Amino acid sequence: MKKRLPPLNWLRSFEAAARHLSFTHAAGELSLTQAAISQQVKGLESQLGAALFKRLPRGLELTDAGLAYLPAIHEAIQRLSVATDEVFGQGRIHQLTLRVNLVFLTTWLAPRLGRFRARYPDIGLRFTSNIWCGESDKEADVEIRYGKGTWPGLKSDRLTWDELFPVCSPALLDNSSSFESLDALGLHPLLHVIGYEEGWGYWLNKTGYSHLDTPRGLQFDTLISALEMAAQGQGFALGRSSLVEGMIADGRLIAPFSQKVATSEAFHLVYPAHQYIHPHAEIFRSWIVEEATAGRERLE
Protein backbone atom coordinates (compact mmCIF):
# COMPACT_ATOMS: atom_id res chain seq x y z
CA MET A 1 0.00 0.00 0.00
CA LYS A 2 1.42 3.38 -1.01
CA LYS A 3 2.22 5.90 1.69
CA ARG A 4 0.06 9.00 1.74
CA LEU A 5 1.90 12.06 0.37
CA PRO A 6 3.07 14.21 3.30
CA PRO A 7 1.83 17.82 3.65
CA LEU A 8 3.82 20.31 1.59
CA ASN A 9 4.64 22.49 4.60
CA TRP A 10 6.26 19.49 6.32
CA LEU A 11 8.37 18.86 3.22
CA ARG A 12 9.40 22.52 3.01
CA SER A 13 10.46 22.50 6.65
CA PHE A 14 12.48 19.33 6.13
CA GLU A 15 14.18 20.71 2.98
CA ALA A 16 15.11 24.02 4.65
CA ALA A 17 16.35 22.34 7.81
CA ALA A 18 18.39 19.87 5.75
CA ARG A 19 20.05 22.67 3.76
CA HIS A 20 20.91 24.66 6.88
CA LEU A 21 21.32 21.66 9.19
CA SER A 22 19.53 23.88 11.69
CA PHE A 23 15.90 24.18 12.76
CA THR A 24 16.59 27.77 13.85
CA HIS A 25 17.92 28.89 10.46
CA ALA A 26 15.12 27.06 8.66
CA ALA A 27 12.61 28.85 10.87
CA GLY A 28 14.11 32.21 9.90
CA GLU A 29 13.93 31.40 6.19
CA LEU A 30 10.32 30.23 6.34
CA SER A 31 9.13 32.86 8.86
CA LEU A 32 8.14 30.22 11.39
CA THR A 33 9.23 29.46 14.93
CA GLN A 34 11.94 26.95 15.69
CA ALA A 35 9.36 24.88 17.56
CA ALA A 36 7.06 24.81 14.52
CA ILE A 37 9.86 23.55 12.27
CA SER A 38 10.79 20.87 14.79
CA GLN A 39 7.17 19.78 15.15
CA GLN A 40 6.62 19.57 11.38
CA VAL A 41 9.79 17.54 10.85
CA LYS A 42 8.71 15.16 13.62
CA GLY A 43 5.32 14.82 11.94
CA LEU A 44 7.03 13.99 8.66
CA GLU A 45 9.29 11.41 10.32
CA SER A 46 6.31 9.85 12.06
CA GLN A 47 4.36 9.54 8.78
CA LEU A 48 7.35 8.13 6.90
CA GLY A 49 8.26 5.79 9.73
CA ALA A 50 11.93 6.79 9.60
CA ALA A 51 14.23 9.31 11.28
CA LEU A 52 15.53 11.98 8.87
CA PHE A 53 17.89 13.79 11.28
CA LYS A 54 20.27 12.90 14.03
CA ARG A 55 19.76 15.48 16.80
CA LEU A 56 23.23 16.38 18.02
CA PRO A 57 24.23 18.67 20.91
CA ARG A 58 25.49 21.26 18.40
CA GLY A 59 23.16 20.95 15.44
CA LEU A 60 21.72 18.38 13.10
CA GLU A 61 23.01 15.64 10.87
CA LEU A 62 21.07 13.86 8.15
CA THR A 63 20.48 10.14 8.55
CA ASP A 64 20.95 7.83 5.57
CA ALA A 65 17.21 8.04 4.95
CA GLY A 66 17.35 11.85 5.09
CA LEU A 67 20.29 11.95 2.68
CA ALA A 68 18.42 9.72 0.23
CA TYR A 69 15.17 11.72 0.53
CA LEU A 70 16.60 15.24 0.29
CA PRO A 71 17.53 15.43 -3.44
CA ALA A 72 14.02 14.51 -4.60
CA ILE A 73 12.35 16.94 -2.19
CA HIS A 74 14.77 19.76 -3.10
CA GLU A 75 14.16 19.25 -6.83
CA ALA A 76 10.39 19.11 -6.39
CA ILE A 77 10.31 22.36 -4.38
CA GLN A 78 12.60 24.07 -6.92
CA ARG A 79 10.37 23.02 -9.79
CA LEU A 80 7.28 24.25 -7.98
CA SER A 81 9.00 27.56 -7.30
CA VAL A 82 10.07 28.01 -10.94
CA ALA A 83 6.65 27.07 -12.31
CA THR A 84 4.88 29.40 -9.88
CA ASP A 85 7.14 32.29 -10.85
CA GLU A 86 6.72 31.63 -14.57
CA VAL A 87 2.95 31.53 -14.42
CA PHE A 88 2.14 33.90 -11.57
CA GLY A 89 5.34 35.84 -10.87
CA GLN A 90 6.10 39.53 -11.13
CA GLY A 91 4.94 41.06 -14.40
CA ARG A 92 2.51 38.23 -15.16
CA ILE A 93 -0.57 39.97 -13.81
CA HIS A 94 -0.88 42.15 -16.92
CA GLN A 95 0.34 39.58 -19.44
CA LEU A 96 -1.78 39.74 -22.60
CA THR A 97 -3.19 36.36 -23.64
CA LEU A 98 -4.01 35.97 -27.35
CA ARG A 99 -5.81 32.96 -28.78
CA VAL A 100 -4.89 32.72 -32.44
CA ASN A 101 -5.27 30.51 -35.49
CA LEU A 102 -1.96 28.72 -36.08
CA VAL A 103 -1.51 29.62 -39.76
CA PHE A 104 -2.20 33.29 -39.03
CA LEU A 105 0.31 33.27 -36.19
CA THR A 106 3.11 31.68 -38.19
CA THR A 107 2.65 33.39 -41.57
CA TRP A 108 1.08 36.79 -40.81
CA LEU A 109 1.59 37.78 -37.19
CA ALA A 110 5.06 36.38 -36.45
CA PRO A 111 6.86 38.48 -39.12
CA ARG A 112 5.23 41.64 -37.73
CA LEU A 113 5.42 40.90 -34.02
CA GLY A 114 8.89 42.38 -33.60
CA ARG A 115 7.47 45.83 -34.32
CA PHE A 116 4.91 45.46 -31.53
CA ARG A 117 7.51 44.28 -29.02
CA ALA A 118 9.85 47.11 -29.98
CA ARG A 119 7.10 49.67 -29.47
CA TYR A 120 5.63 48.12 -26.31
CA PRO A 121 8.47 46.21 -24.58
CA ASP A 122 6.66 46.16 -21.23
CA ILE A 123 3.62 44.26 -22.48
CA GLY A 124 4.05 40.51 -22.02
CA LEU A 125 2.43 38.19 -24.55
CA ARG A 126 1.10 34.67 -24.19
CA PHE A 127 -0.24 32.73 -27.18
CA THR A 128 -2.67 29.83 -27.28
CA SER A 129 -3.82 28.23 -30.51
CA ASN A 130 -7.23 27.51 -31.97
CA ILE A 131 -8.37 25.75 -35.11
CA TRP A 132 -11.98 26.74 -35.67
CA CYS A 133 -14.60 28.51 -33.64
CA GLY A 134 -15.80 26.73 -30.56
CA GLU A 135 -15.90 27.54 -26.92
CA SER A 136 -14.21 30.85 -26.22
CA ASP A 137 -11.00 30.68 -24.27
CA LYS A 138 -11.99 32.34 -21.00
CA GLU A 139 -8.36 33.16 -20.22
CA ALA A 140 -7.78 34.92 -23.56
CA ASP A 141 -8.01 38.72 -23.68
CA VAL A 142 -8.49 38.76 -27.46
CA GLU A 143 -8.78 36.14 -30.17
CA ILE A 144 -8.10 35.92 -33.89
CA ARG A 145 -10.74 33.94 -35.77
CA TYR A 146 -11.41 33.09 -39.39
CA GLY A 147 -14.88 33.58 -40.81
CA LYS A 148 -17.43 36.15 -41.95
CA GLY A 149 -16.87 38.45 -38.97
CA THR A 150 -20.10 37.96 -37.02
CA TRP A 151 -20.14 35.98 -33.78
CA PRO A 152 -22.74 36.34 -31.00
CA GLY A 153 -21.58 38.55 -28.14
CA LEU A 154 -18.34 39.54 -29.85
CA LYS A 155 -17.01 42.61 -31.63
CA SER A 156 -14.61 42.08 -34.52
CA ASP A 157 -12.02 44.00 -36.53
CA ARG A 158 -11.21 42.64 -39.99
CA LEU A 159 -7.51 41.99 -40.55
CA THR A 160 -7.24 40.43 -44.03
CA TRP A 161 -8.70 41.01 -47.49
CA ASP A 162 -7.61 37.93 -49.42
CA GLU A 163 -7.63 36.58 -52.91
CA LEU A 164 -7.57 32.82 -53.41
CA PHE A 165 -5.25 31.13 -55.90
CA PRO A 166 -3.47 27.77 -56.28
CA VAL A 167 0.07 27.46 -54.95
CA CYS A 168 2.57 24.65 -55.23
CA SER A 169 6.24 23.82 -54.93
CA PRO A 170 8.58 25.08 -57.68
CA ALA A 171 9.66 21.44 -58.00
CA LEU A 172 6.17 20.56 -59.20
CA LEU A 173 6.54 23.05 -62.04
CA ASP A 174 9.98 21.66 -62.92
CA ASN A 175 8.50 18.18 -63.23
CA SER A 176 5.58 19.17 -65.46
CA SER A 177 5.31 20.66 -68.91
CA SER A 178 1.59 21.43 -68.74
CA PHE A 179 0.90 24.49 -66.57
CA GLU A 180 -0.56 26.63 -69.33
CA SER A 181 -4.16 26.21 -68.10
CA LEU A 182 -6.04 25.17 -65.01
CA ASP A 183 -6.46 21.74 -66.52
CA ALA A 184 -3.08 21.02 -64.95
CA LEU A 185 -4.85 20.87 -61.60
CA GLY A 186 -6.32 17.57 -62.76
CA LEU A 187 -2.85 16.04 -62.83
CA HIS A 188 -1.97 16.61 -59.17
CA PRO A 189 -3.63 16.10 -55.77
CA LEU A 190 -5.55 19.03 -54.30
CA LEU A 191 -4.83 19.73 -50.63
CA HIS A 192 -8.11 20.49 -48.86
CA VAL A 193 -8.55 22.27 -45.52
CA ILE A 194 -11.55 21.41 -43.36
CA GLY A 195 -13.53 24.38 -42.10
CA TYR A 196 -13.08 26.88 -44.91
CA GLU A 197 -16.41 27.53 -46.67
CA GLU A 198 -14.60 29.04 -49.64
CA GLY A 199 -12.34 26.11 -50.44
CA TRP A 200 -11.43 24.27 -53.63
CA GLY A 201 -15.03 23.64 -54.66
CA TYR A 202 -15.86 27.33 -54.34
CA TRP A 203 -12.73 28.37 -56.24
CA LEU A 204 -13.19 25.91 -59.12
CA ASN A 205 -16.83 26.95 -59.49
CA LYS A 206 -15.92 30.66 -59.58
CA THR A 207 -13.24 30.10 -62.24
CA GLY A 208 -15.49 27.93 -64.41
CA TYR A 209 -13.62 24.70 -63.77
CA SER A 210 -16.11 22.90 -61.53
CA HIS A 211 -16.21 20.14 -64.15
CA LEU A 212 -12.53 19.38 -63.62
CA ASP A 213 -11.83 15.78 -62.66
CA THR A 214 -9.20 16.14 -59.96
CA PRO A 215 -7.27 13.31 -58.29
CA ARG A 216 -8.23 12.25 -54.79
CA GLY A 217 -6.48 14.75 -52.56
CA LEU A 218 -5.51 15.07 -48.92
CA GLN A 219 -7.47 16.73 -46.13
CA PHE A 220 -6.10 18.78 -43.23
CA ASP A 221 -7.58 20.55 -40.24
CA THR A 222 -5.14 23.48 -40.51
CA LEU A 223 -4.09 25.53 -43.52
CA ILE A 224 -0.48 25.66 -42.32
CA SER A 225 -0.30 21.87 -42.76
CA ALA A 226 -1.67 22.08 -46.31
CA LEU A 227 0.76 24.86 -47.23
CA GLU A 228 3.70 22.90 -45.86
CA MET A 229 2.66 19.81 -47.81
CA ALA A 230 2.38 21.95 -50.95
CA ALA A 231 5.89 23.28 -50.32
CA GLN A 232 7.05 19.66 -50.08
CA GLY A 233 5.69 18.98 -53.58
CA GLN A 234 2.66 16.93 -52.49
CA GLY A 235 0.09 18.84 -54.57
CA PHE A 236 -1.73 22.16 -54.85
CA ALA A 237 -2.95 24.13 -51.85
CA LEU A 238 -5.40 27.00 -52.13
CA GLY A 239 -3.39 29.99 -51.01
CA ARG A 240 -4.74 33.11 -49.36
CA SER A 241 -2.78 36.16 -50.46
CA SER A 242 -2.04 37.58 -47.01
CA LEU A 243 -0.77 34.21 -45.76
CA VAL A 244 1.38 32.93 -48.62
CA GLU A 245 3.22 36.09 -49.66
CA GLY A 246 6.15 35.24 -47.39
CA MET A 247 6.46 31.66 -48.66
CA ILE A 248 6.28 32.91 -52.25
CA ALA A 249 8.90 35.58 -51.57
CA ASP A 250 11.16 32.90 -50.04
CA GLY A 251 10.73 30.71 -53.11
CA ARG A 252 9.12 27.85 -51.18
CA LEU A 253 5.85 28.27 -53.09
CA ILE A 254 4.88 29.58 -56.51
CA ALA A 255 1.54 30.72 -57.96
CA PRO A 256 1.63 29.33 -61.51
CA PHE A 257 -1.83 30.53 -62.61
CA SER A 258 -3.19 34.05 -63.05
CA GLN A 259 -6.76 33.29 -61.94
CA LYS A 260 -7.61 34.74 -58.52
CA VAL A 261 -10.90 34.84 -56.63
CA ALA A 262 -11.75 37.32 -53.88
CA THR A 263 -12.94 35.80 -50.62
CA SER A 264 -15.49 37.17 -48.19
CA GLU A 265 -14.00 35.09 -45.38
CA ALA A 266 -11.21 36.75 -43.44
CA PHE A 267 -9.23 36.74 -40.24
CA HIS A 268 -10.70 38.97 -37.55
CA LEU A 269 -9.57 40.17 -34.16
CA VAL A 270 -12.47 39.47 -31.80
CA TYR A 271 -13.18 40.48 -28.21
CA PRO A 272 -16.21 40.60 -25.89
CA ALA A 273 -18.83 43.17 -26.87
CA HIS A 274 -20.05 43.93 -23.36
CA GLN A 275 -17.09 43.16 -21.10
CA TYR A 276 -14.11 45.06 -19.81
CA ILE A 277 -11.10 44.89 -22.12
CA HIS A 278 -7.72 45.38 -20.48
CA PRO A 279 -5.74 48.47 -21.61
CA HIS A 280 -2.99 46.18 -22.95
CA ALA A 281 -5.56 44.40 -25.10
CA GLU A 282 -6.76 47.74 -26.44
CA ILE A 283 -3.16 48.70 -27.27
CA PHE A 284 -2.70 45.41 -29.14
CA ARG A 285 -6.02 45.89 -30.95
CA SER A 286 -5.02 49.34 -32.18
CA TRP A 287 -1.60 48.10 -33.27
CA ILE A 288 -2.80 45.06 -35.21
CA VAL A 289 -5.55 47.03 -36.97
CA GLU A 290 -2.91 49.58 -37.95
CA GLU A 291 -0.71 46.78 -39.34
CA ALA A 292 -3.62 45.25 -41.25
CA THR A 293 -4.60 48.59 -42.76
CA ALA A 294 -1.02 49.28 -43.82
CA GLY A 295 -0.79 45.85 -45.43
CA ARG A 296 -4.01 46.36 -47.35
CA GLU A 297 -2.88 49.77 -48.62
CA ARG A 298 0.42 48.27 -49.75
CA LEU A 299 -1.35 45.56 -51.75
CA GLU A 300 -3.64 48.12 -53.37
Image: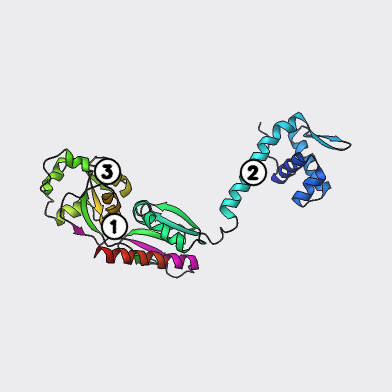
Where in the figure is residue 215, as x and y percent of width and height?
17, 40
* For residue 146, above or below residue 51: below
Where in the figure is residue 201, as x and y percent of width and height?
19, 51
* SS of the residue under disc 2: helix
Question: Distance from label 2 to label 1 (Cα)?
Answer: 45 Å
Decide if residue 246 is on the left or right side of residue 41: left
**Which residue was labeled with disc 2?**
78
Res 125 visible? yes
* Residue 282 part of the magenta-drawn span: yes
In this rendering, which labeled residue sits more in front, label 3 or label 2? Answer: 3
* For residue 79, above or below residue 1: below
Where in the figure is residue 251, as x and y percent of width and height?
26, 47
Question: Distance from label 3 to label 2 (Cα)?
Answer: 44 Å
* For residue 279, above or below residue 70: below
* SS of the residue under disc 3: helix
Mark 3 in CB contact with mark 1 (< 8 angstroms): no
Pick the front one: 202 or 69: 69
Q: Residues within 10 Å of mark 2 (few under 14, many from 20)?
A: few
Mark 2 in CB contact with mark 1 (< 8 angstroms): no
Q: Residue 231: which disc?
A: 3
Question: Distance from label 3 to label 1 (Cα)?
Answer: 17 Å
* SS of the residue under disc 1: helix
* Residue 155 part of the magenta-drawn span: no
Q: Earlier in the sequence, mark 2 or mark 1?
A: 2
Decide if residue 183 is on the left or right side of residue 197: left
Q: On the rendered image, what quadrant is the N terminus found in?
A: top right
**Which residue was labeled with disc 1?**
242
Q: On the rendered image, what quadrant is the C terminus found in?
A: bottom left
